[in-house]
Amino acid sequence: MNSARPWPTLVVASALTLFCAVTAGVAGSAAGTELTRGPSTAELRTAAAQEVAERWRAWPTGRIFPATLPYSAEQGGRERAHRVGISPHSACGADAVDAKAVEALRAAGCKGVLRATYVDALRGVLVTIGVVALRDEPGAVHAKSAFADNGKPAPGLRPLAFTGTVSDRFTPAVRQSGSVRQAGPYLVLTTAGQVDGRPADAAGEPRPAIFAFATDIAERVLSELSTPKMPDCAAREWRC
């Protein structure tokens, strides 16, 4: 009887079996770690940027345009502008901005234009605020150049009037002041005029101070829209 023991073969086979088992264990552990680990800082920042870019569509319009907005009054102290109404339309067309700016917005990847009109605390000045959502920040920077940045109302945002309200005479001819601000993928535009409906060319000596609050409230709207918020994986609105 041959009593030779083929131990080298057995040892090698056992070693290969052990190696495969260890390799599978490491791979399984890595896969498990990948599946169970929390999001990285880079992933959280990406998610935060995506959330900012979708706020114009995801947030209720009443959150974007609150019923009142605080501002610094011309005579000192604090006042609040009151919302007259919000447009139900969001197209990137000539109803929202002057025709000269429409093509620039579309070329920059305009997704939508939201508008709301406010009246100041003394009910003498109207301002329409427009939120323009672009595809990304470079697009917003490029689109900004299509609008007047010297306080002139044109080319700029078109006023939003509501029949039967204090704003019903707020037409393009009434515009006396305008502004444009940019942060992230957003532009926030304003156009302002007087409640009595006097045309800009009949307004007499310019009084830019009475329209200064428009920029104040616009910057508040822009800050709320464009300031990133790091995701909270424990909160209901985030899925991590």
Image (cartoon, rainbow, N blue to C red):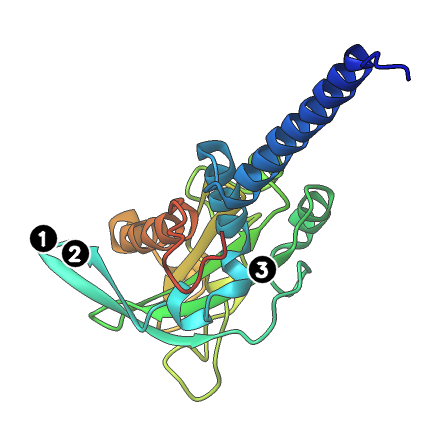
Is the residue under label 2 in contact with that under label 1 (CB below 8 Å)? yes
Residue 76, label in figure: 1
Residue 113, x across and y down, in percent: 58, 59
> Foreground residue, 52 or 157?
52
Q: Which residue is mark 3?
A: 113
Query: In the rendered structure, which amino acid carries the disc numbered 1?
Result: Gly
Left or right: 79 in relation to 104: left
Left or right: 11 in relation to 192: right
Residue 66, x across and y down, in percent: 34, 69
Whole-number angstrom distance, CA of label 3 to CA of label 1:
32 Å
The quadrant in which residue 120 appears is: bottom left
Q: Residue at x 26, y 73 (%)?
A: 123
Whole-number angstrom distance, CA of label 2 to CA of label 3:
28 Å
Q: Residues within 10 Å of mark 3 (few under 14, many from 20)?
A: many
Q: Residue furthest right?
A: 1
Q: Earlier in the sequence, mark 3 or mark 1?
A: 1
Is the residue under label 1 in contact with that under label 3 (CB below 8 Å)? no
Query: In the rendered structure, which amino acid carries the disc numbered 2?
Result: Ala
Residue 73, label in figure: 2
Q: Secondary structure at mark 2?
A: loop
Query: Quick check: 212 above or below 20?
Result: below
Q: Residue at x 56, y 38 (%)?
A: 34
Query: Quick check: 151 above or below 239?
Result: above
Q: Is residue 213 visible?
A: yes
Query: In the rendered structure, which amino acid carries the disc numbered 3?
Result: Val
Q: Quadrant of the N terminus?
A: top right
